[in-house]
Amino acid sequence: MRHRDRVERGGYPEASMTDHPDFSVVVKNRGRPPSPWKWEIYRAGRASPVKQSEDYFSSVTEANRVGKKALSLFLSEYYEEVSHTIRGSCRNIAQ
């Protein structure tokens, strides 16, 4: 199955959800020990994060792991929204 076919059917393998060229997870030291780490999701071309953790983490590894899960969820919601918008636009054109 080609990638485009998966996109049109809404099927995305989990690995591709965190390997998106326009979005990335960055872990930053934003707090005080013992839990200073937060994850932030950035979109290419933007200086500020599109989403960030409310919680602080005790290690970079833990923040990164949770951040990647958050990115996967964020991208699945993003793709649903884009897909819904595209389908609505196509219906409007057909009418």
Image (cartoon, rainbow, N blue to C red):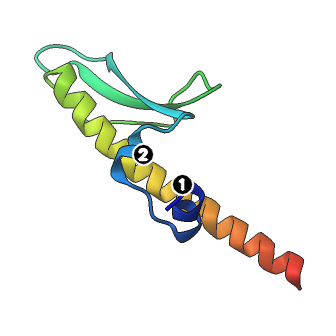
Quadrant, the C terminus: bottom right
Q: Are marks 2 and 1 in contact (CB under 8 Å)?
A: yes
How crowded pointer 1 is (Cα within 10 Å; few <14, some 14-19, many 20+) is rated as few
Residue 56, can we see it? no
Q: Which residue is mark 2?
A: 16
Near-viewer residue (43 or 94):
94
Between residue 19 and residue 50, name the one nearer to us: 19
Query: Mark 1: which amino acid?
Result: His
Asked if 52 appears above or below 70 in the picture, the reply is above
Answer with mark 2 or mark 1, whichever residue precedes in sequence: 1
Using residue 83 as the reference point, say whether residue 54 is left or right of it. left
Image x and y of residue 92, in percent: 84, 78
Q: Quadrant of residue 59?
A: top left
The image position of residue 86, as x and y in percent, is: 71, 66
Residue identifier under label 1: 3
Label 2 element class: helix
Query: What residue appears at the point 73 percent right and 74 percent down from the top-left corner?
Result: 88
Amino acid type, residue under disc 2 in the picture: Ser
